[in-house]
Image: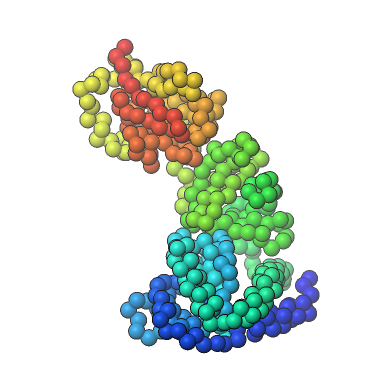
Amino acid sequence: MLDKAMPNRLDKQISTLLSRLQGPWVCDRTDNHMMGFLYKRQRKAPHRWILYRIILNGNNLYYFNDSTSKRPRGIISISFISQKLVTTEAHLLEIKNPEVSQHHLMVFSPNRLDFFAAPTNEDLDKWYSSMSKIINESLTSQEINFRENVLQELLPLLSQKSSQDVEKIILMIAELEHSGFVKGRVKKDRTGNLEMWLDDEEKWVKYYFVLQNKCLYYYKTSKAPPKGIITLQFTTTSDDEEGPNGEDFCFKLRTPLSSFILRAKHQVAMEEWIDAIDTVKLGKKRDSVKRKSKSDDDGLLAGEFQDISRINDISLDEPSGSYHKKNLPTIAYVNPEGKKKTHKLPLGATVIGRSESSAITLDDKQVSRSHAKIEVSEDVAVISDLGSGHGTRVNHTTLTSRTVIRHGDSITVGKTKLKFLVTKK
């Protein structure tokens, strides 16, 4: 249970420090105009950010609903600002836009505290530089040092306050569930343990993950407040990734702010997590073409092809007639030792990848274990990417769906270039 006296004592400490930072002053300069757009966190709805047009005049920030508004929505008189603070995945979820700066600012003014982020890192740097310049020119070095010391004392208390608020909410929900006011818990799409690679510590750390509402929460234990959050709305997923030290069963989640390398216990668990994430994010599992195995049906539906018109657009140099009856489809490439390799493509599916189980095995670290697949029928050959980390290109065009290939086409997987050739028997 939380110590009821603790939040009161903490609130008093925060209030005292804020009062020291929020002391008003006036900037005499009027030639320091700046205008642009910033995201401002709502004070009455702290989990919501709105993009405002901002005008800086003196030490006053005027914020307008949009570029056509003539009267400001409000005025903020700057007393002090924080250093640039890291924008987290939780902030990205609140802002609901991937186009946001990697840092944000706290702006202190009489009787209020506001948070600002910018659409780009360059924009935030300009605003931070302008506001810092005003403060440095208007306050004495002694006043600036005093406020900076107060700020350093305040920041950990604000973090502690935030953690306590989260813990209180968790306890409140648990109490409501126990009392019968909440019928059933909020549906969780998937839960379980995964390891996460921490670059700073250069080691794997085991967390308990909860997939819910297009977010992936991770906890030290299932009963503790979340250690962090990964927003899936703007996330791309790549499987068949190697861990930093060559570990298996890893996949990567990339967000506009950072990348996360996660490791499952085995291949099946990894694929189940990826499918669950894709289902939550897209409303369906990843394209079934990417998840099929060699034994899957090899039938080709013309309606699924990309650029199907190329079937009838055969150059004079390409042999005519059905595959394997009159012509033999082949993949040619040069291995790392400089030796030319050729692989005859049978009817059905041929997988290209780094794994020894692949029909065409490539010694290339940028090639996924099961990277791409070529499906050959009697009339056509089609290539598809299998959800690889670095993608597959045909004639310098990255694949987004099944694509018909013909004699002479260049195929790039990882750093390896292959050639699709058709020769007469």
Name the residue located 41 percent from the left edge and 22 percent from the top edge: 333
Name the residue located 38 percent from the left edge and 39 percent from the top edge: 399
Residue 39 seen in the figure:
no
Tell which of 233 and 9 is nearer to you: 9
24 relative to 130, above or below: below
User: In the image, residue 269 lies at what x, y percent?
Assistant: 61, 41
In the image as oriented, which residue stretches furthest toward the top? 425
Q: Quadrant of the C terminus?
A: top left
Residue 318 seen in the figure:
yes
121 relative to 38, above or below: above
User: In the image, residue 77 lies at what x, y percent?
Assistant: 51, 84
* 332 sits left or right of 87 in the view: left
Write down the quadrant of residue 383 in the picture: top left
User: In the image, residue 55 lies at what x, y percent?
Assistant: 41, 78
User: In the image, residue 271 lies at what x, y percent?
Assistant: 56, 41
* 166 sits left or right of 399 in the view: right
Tell which of 195 and 151 is nearer to you: 151
Name the residue located 48 percent from the left edge and 46 percent from the top edge: 285
Write down the quadrant of residue 186 in the picture: bottom right
Tell which of 219 and 43 is nearer to you: 43
Write down the quadrant of residue 224 in the picture: bottom right
